[in-house]
Image: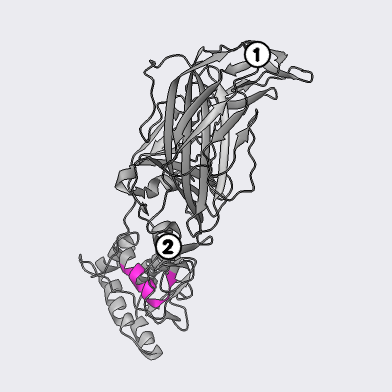
Amino acid sequence: MIYKHLSLSSAALVAASLFTLPACKDGGSADTDTATEGSATDAGTDSTPTSGSPTGNPTGDPTGDPTGDPTGDPTGDPTGDPTTDTGVDDGPHALGTIFLGESHPAAGGVTAPAVSAFFIPDVDGGGAGGACTKTVAGCQINLLPDCGGGGCNPDEYCGFNDSCKAVCQPICDASCGDGEVCYFPSPGNAGCKKLESFDAGALTFLGTPIPITLFPPYGFMSDDNASPFAPGASAKVQASGASNAGFEKFEKEFTGTDFIQTSPKLDTLGFSAVFGNGPLPVKWTPGSGSVTITASVTSPNFTTGTITCKADDASGKFDVPREALKAAIDGEDISALTLSVQRQRTDLYKDLTTKGQLTGITVQPIGFLQIITSSTEYHAFQGCDFGEAVCNEQCVDVQYDNANCGGCNKACVGDDTCEEGACIGANACNACAADAELGVCKGANDACAADPDCKAFEKCFTACGTQACQDACLEGVTQETIDLYNAQISCICDNACTTECSGLCG
């Protein structure tokens, strides 16, 4: 029993509770069982942001529009299935991107088609977009610009420059009329110019499963729950040519990518595989395209983030690094996750031409065209509530679960109970006291052990089972001896083990 004595004048010594305080040892230590909790290691984060987002679905919203920005960084050299290449050297060029995609839930159901097109007059001169990212464990996380605590002036906004450094940039605030747009004819001087288009005219698709005709600015709407391309089949796109500035008339052929099929299906992944501590395994039927895995994660505090990971299609598998998933939400726990697996094929042509002029923008005479077909499978997972953890494939309140107290499989012993993630009771108190005697309370414990009177009193007092025995032990004991004994008890009850010994010290 642990007893706490305040003075010799106490008429009776009050028992704190029924748990045992190990007696003082002469230069020795109590035999204790200690558990060491491992800490996660830094898996290596490349914090240097890079310009350009990976291909795939950087929006991470496969339940809505799974295409997002389907081309990612269109200035690069698209990868995937064999491309059509006329042999024109890479160099300054305009770029056209035509995207045909389908997305379907892993659990089955209707497919959602998506078709888009856009044309850029000068890739090297800007306008191709691109994101600033950082790489964590081989996957990319989009960065948000942060211009410091002071923020920017009212006539500025925070954005990334070409080096992906967050800087305050001027807002184009010239008062423009209808049919005009604000721009900077020179640095710091806002002006207005005529709103000009750069396109390829009407786009007509031949040989696609659903009829597709697009007119600038190329909005697409369809009631068909079908893919806009057939897997492995050839189709064509005809462009009538821009009426003003843009691409000249062209007709190009493309081949649809194979549909992506996860195996096992994403919706059959175990709970601990998705929300546990290890990598998130993803498998699919192998193919020969370009595969991108996108995961959008949410923390219990509603922090959100998205990672994209490139995978080898032929391998048919990829383990999404847990450290990348958590890094997207600043290391917090994951309460919800949406996962998508996307396969793309890109047919690339470099022999197109452009025409026309734009105010303040170079129009490159040579035009490249990439036609991308994409298939995406997705599933959304709901995790645990705040304070819960995934233990044995289910959510557990580790704050109050006796079998998983403060973490999975951390059971409280005997009649101890779990409160706020810590075991409270005789067993927890004794274990804590044993550790404290060799740690923070070692000085007080050694002081009693080194004093013959304190050591003798402790041996007598802790062996008692009745009040009469306790009173007998107190006979002739000085206040100084009692204070020495009480110091070690006070250290345990009031300092080292206040939680574990809650309600047990008196």
Q: Quadrant of residue 354?
A: top right
* 424 falls in the magenta region: yes
- On the image, the x and y values in percent for residue 343 come to 42, 43
Q: Is residue 149 visible?
A: no
Quadrant the N terminus occupies? bottom left
CB within 8 Å, label 2 to label 1: no
- On the image, the x and y values in percent for residue 390 come to 43, 64
Q: Quadrant of residue 245?
A: top right
- Magenta region: 423-434
Q: Secondary structure at mark 1?
A: strand
Q: How is the structure coloured here?
A: one colour
Residue position for label 1 = 184
Prevailing SS of the magenta stretch: helix
- Is residue 45 toward the left or the right of residue 75 in the image? left
- Is residue 223 toward the left or the right of residue 285 in the image? right
**Looking at the picture, which amino acid does disc 2 mark?**
Thr
Residue farthest toward the front in the current orientation of the protein:
207
| Eye-nearest disc, 2 or 1 | 2
Q: CA distance from mark 2 to mark 1?
A: 53 Å
Q: Is residue 110 visible?
A: yes
Q: Quadrant of residue 264?
A: bottom left
Residue 314's disc number: none
- On the image, the x and y values in percent for residue 326 come to 44, 48
**Looking at the picture, which amino acid does disc 1 mark?**
Phe
- Is residue 169 toward the left or the right of residue 306 in the image? right
Residue drawn at x 52%, y 13% is 364
Q: Secondary structure at mark 2?
A: helix
Residue position for label 2 = 268
- On the image, the x and y values in percent for residue 127 come to 55, 21
